[in-house]
Amino acid sequence: MEASLAWLDQPETFRVNELPAHSDHQFFASPEEAAAGSSSLTRSLDGQWQFAFAADPELIPAGFYAPAFDEAGFAPMAVPGHIELAGYAKIQYTNTPYPWDGHEFRRPAYTTPATNPQVGQFSRASDNYVGLYRKTFTLADDWADRPLTIQFAGVERAMYLWCNGEFVGYAEDSFTPSAFDLTPYVHRGKNLIAVAVFRHSTASWLEDQDFFRFTGIFRSVTLQSLPATHVVDLVLDARPNADFTAGTLAVTAKLSPVANHAKATITLADASGQVLATQVTAAQATTTWPTLTVPQPHLWSHHNPYLYQVQVTVTDDTGAVCEVATAATGFRRIEVTPEHMVLLNGKRLIINGVNRHEWSDLRGRAITEADMAADMATIRTHHINAVRTCHYPDQLEWYHLCDTNGIYVMAETNLETHGTWQKPAGIEPSYNVPGSVKQWEAAVLDRAKTQYETLKNHPSILFWSLGNESYAGDDIAAMNAYYKRVDPTRLVHYEGVVHNRQYEDQISDLESRMYTPPAEVAEYLSGEAKKPFLLCEYMHSMGNSVGGLNEYLDLVDRFDAYVGGFIWDFKDQALTVTDPITGQPVMRYGGDFDDRPSAYEFSGDGLVFADGTPKPALQEVSEDYARYDD
């Protein structure tokens, strides 16, 4: 199969030869590795890659992906990292406008008119610069006879992959893992991976978030060596019963390939490691075990983030271990009463939340585990109990941190098309996508499915969010229906129906709004409210702000159907650079990089500065949120 630049223009093409999404469980070659938490079946490709920059698609060197290609024009590039922060392209921050507004005239495919596929919109665009990456690795003998996959945890915005000169696959969706099978292409000894990362594709229309517009391989890259029988996917369905006196755990695993007479053993242990149950069954492509019952389960919550440990061990016909897969789970139940009160484990849920972009003042969105740990420490010590992952899935480690620290998560699908329906003159959705445009439906459904399949086992996730500020139409209604079909254990959230009320009975379990004054919240809840009320964004933390938060918290006492909200936002987006005059490190915001269009200082609206230093506003939030941190 040959790669085609035409895919960049086609909303219907968003994955080619990409492996299906699956749970983010860990897997190991032995019980000893599982106990140590270190797997010999994975290998990081993070570090220095060879890199070259092409100003537009027509300037890509022919055959750059071939092993014999001369790398004389390439230079080292850190992976993970952003092309722009390495100095190859302009740093740009914008909110609602698309990054090409005022420079290039564009409309989404199949919108103006509905028959126009916009051929060449990105594949022949002079502003669509390309990052070209090359990385060699040596395939050791003990890996050479096993299936090999490669996983890219995050690539902005569209990527083509080659191995040893042969085309492997294509992927969009910047913020969920993309995995490919390398088995047919690799051999013992030295192998070459090559990647072309394009600044723009039709995915650019779906990723109009309020953030710096970066490009490149900005999350980790990992090789995975798969054993004779591999746990491809793991589904953990932990539910307490009606009176919380017992819990049930149903476990399903997908195995591939399945060796004859292989066995699959499931072990459930409590937080201390004490084994509560063990079951053995014949390994099958889809393996299920009898449902386990746990008497008096510890219920997972903010103040008691109790996790049970699940281990699946696959053995061959001789009893030798093929693989050990591990994951954590928690017993908790979220529901809505007929009076529109949201309950967690039978008690009223109050969200003291923040919106959180992934951000480092030094690395942009290429954050580290240390960055995440620092954010979590600030959140935990200031009575914040919930995070909305605005407006895309985060690194996988973040969800594990939320599981272990008891932070409630609104997991947001990677979708925002703000600039297609909100214009300078107001709401005008004439070329809104996805809207009800059939050619865009599969792409957004895939983003919902990928998020669900990857993150489904995390007890911290209470809400699936359909995205942000993308208006409303049939395609988002289809996303809502998907989440409700595959996951009855969580609520579905979306704010955009407030702009298109004909969909309010098809989309969202919550009445979600942004920046609504307390009096208007009270007006809704005093009337014939249809749903619980949640502020997915409020108390915009810019400048001398966040005063008056107590007026929103007073609504908690007045209305049982008021759930609380998520402050915008947790951390400034700013970059520490060296001032050319003083030679001192300084923080720079949108517009400081001669970026146009730009939303300028609008990137500075966090409770903490970009380096994590608390602002005075955080003191007020901590004091007010403490009222309902019980």
Image (spheres, rainbow, N blue to C red):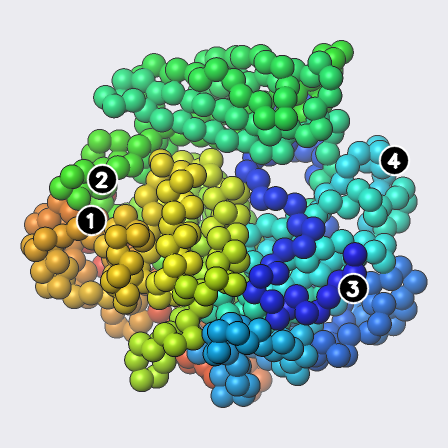
Q: Amino acid at mark 3?
A: Gln
Rendered image: mark on residue 50: 3
Q: Which residue is mark 4?
A: 141
Closest to the observer, 321 or 250: 250
169 sits to left or right of 369: right
Q: Residue at x 75, y 79 (%)?
A: 58
Residue 570, quarter of the rendered image: bottom left
Pointers 1 and 2 in contact (C-beta within 8 Å): yes
Pointers 4 and 3 in contact (C-beta within 8 Å): no
Q: Amino acid at mark 4?
A: Asp
Disc 1 residue crowd, few under 14, some 14–19, many 20+, Cα 10 Å? many
Q: Nearer the viewer, mark 2 or mark 3?
A: 2
Chain-order first, disc 2 or disc 3: 3
Q: Amino acid at mark 1?
A: Pro
Evaluate whether residue 462 shows in this view.
Answer: no
Q: x and y percent of residue 620 in the render?
A: 23, 59
The local secondary structure at tag 4 comes to helix
Closest to the observer, 600 or 319: 319
Chain-order first, disc 1 or disc 3: 3
Q: Which residue is mark 1?
A: 532
Disc 3 residue crowd, few under 14, some 14–19, many 20+, Cα 10 Å? some
Disc 2 residue crowd, few under 14, some 14–19, many 20+, Cα 10 Å? some
The CA span between labels 1 and 2 is 8 Å
Pointers 2 and 3 in contact (C-beta within 8 Å): no
276 sits to left or right of 491: right
Q: Quadrant of the N terminus?
A: bottom right
The local secondary structure at tag 3 comes to strand
Chain-order first, disc 4 or disc 1: 4
Q: Which residue is mark 2?
A: 336
